[in-house]
Image (spheres, rainbow, N blue to C red):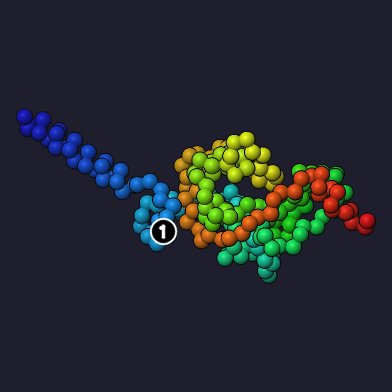
């Protein structure tokens, strides 16, 4: 009887621990200020997402920059907000594009090539960015290259390396999404991509 009692007690304690763990690791809430309490599990998820975004080079294209003493420096207030809507038009040599060359905007937030001109998206939680996106949309865009994460739409243009991101785990994608949702929202309507036929016709070759 004593052995049965101890076994039952242990099971009761274990059930209580599991129940507490389940409650303390609740689902993601886009309206919660995760950055205000670094002791919460969500803070760890945000830190993981931050690390992944940094290692994956997302800032290289998605964060506007200004020139500093050591080259391009990220503008902190515009972190991951995409190609600025008010940026000067991109200039390039149509002859180079016809030959297969790619040309980057000075801060790398836009690129021109045989595919046309592509502009880095706004990844902040503003409505002009991913503020209205679901995590499933984000996963589909990141790992399947679907524009805005919608089936039936066009494929994301270069230099977005979505093919490499197919190997991200669901946990990693979740961490990235939670981190992006924790950023300050930046209102910025990124220009629509320009098709290759339009860029060849619209951008004169140097010297013409």
Q: Nearer the viewer, residue 38 or 208?
A: 208
Return the x and y of residue 30 as percentages of the image width and height. Answer: 44, 52
Query: Furthest-bottom residue in view?
Result: 69
Residue displayed at 81% across by 47% down: 198
Is 135 displayed left or right of 8 in the figure? right
In the figure, 65 relative to 202: above or below?
A: below
In the image, residue 7 above or below residue 148: above
Query: What residue appears at the point 26 percent right and 45 percent down from the top-left corner?
Result: 20
Q: Secondary structure at mark 1?
A: loop
Q: Nearer the viewer, residue 154 or 172?
A: 154
For the question of whether residue 207 can be seen, the reply is: yes
Please tell me how many numbered marks the rendered image carries.
1
Residue 109 shown left or right of residue 115 in the figure: left
Q: Residue at x 42, y 55 (%)?
A: 31
Locate residue 81 relative to residue 105 in the image: left or right: left
User: Horizontal and vertical percent for residue 155?
Assistant: 66, 39
Quick check: 123 above or below 17? below
Query: How far from the left and from the top, in percent, is residue 26?
Result: 35, 47
Residue shown at 76% from the left, 45% from the top: 195
Query: Looking at the figure, which quarter contains the C terminus?
Result: bottom right
Q: Quadrant of the N terminus?
A: top left
Most extreme residue toward the left is: 1
State which quadrant residue 156 falls in. top right
Quarter of the image where one finds residue 148: top right
Q: Label 1 crowding class (10 Å Cα cut-off): few <14, some 14-19, many 20+? A: few
In this picture, residue 145 sits left or right of residue 89 = left
- Residue linked to disc 1: 33
Outermost residue to the right: 208
* Residue 44 showing in the rendered view: no
């Amino acid at each position: 009887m004593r052995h049965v009692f101890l076994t039952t007690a242990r099971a009761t304690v274990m059930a209580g621990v599991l129940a507490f763990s389940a409650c303390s690791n609740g689902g993601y809430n886009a309206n919660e200020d995760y950055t205000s309490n670094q002791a919460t599990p969500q803070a760890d998820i945000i830190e993981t997402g931050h690390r992944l975004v940094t290692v994956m080079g997302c800032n290289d294209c998605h964060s506007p920059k200004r020139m500093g003493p050591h080259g391009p420096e990220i503008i902190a207030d515009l972190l991951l907000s995409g190609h600025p809507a008010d940026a000067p038009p991109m200039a390039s040599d149509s002859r180079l594009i016809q030959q297969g060359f790619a040309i980057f905007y000075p801060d790398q937030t836009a690129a021109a090539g045989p595919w046309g001109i592509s502009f880095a998206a706004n990844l902040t939680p503003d409505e002009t960015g991913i503020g209205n996106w679901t995590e499933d949309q984000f996963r589909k865009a990141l790992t399947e290259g679907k524009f805005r994460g919608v089936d039936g739409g066009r494929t994301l243009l270069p230099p977005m390396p979505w093919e490499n991101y197919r190997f991200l785990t669901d946990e990693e994608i979740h961490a990235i999404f939670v981190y992006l949702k924790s950023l300050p929202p930046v209102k910025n309507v990124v220009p629509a991509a320009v098709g290759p036929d339009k860029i060849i016709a619209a951008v004169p070759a140097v010297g013409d």
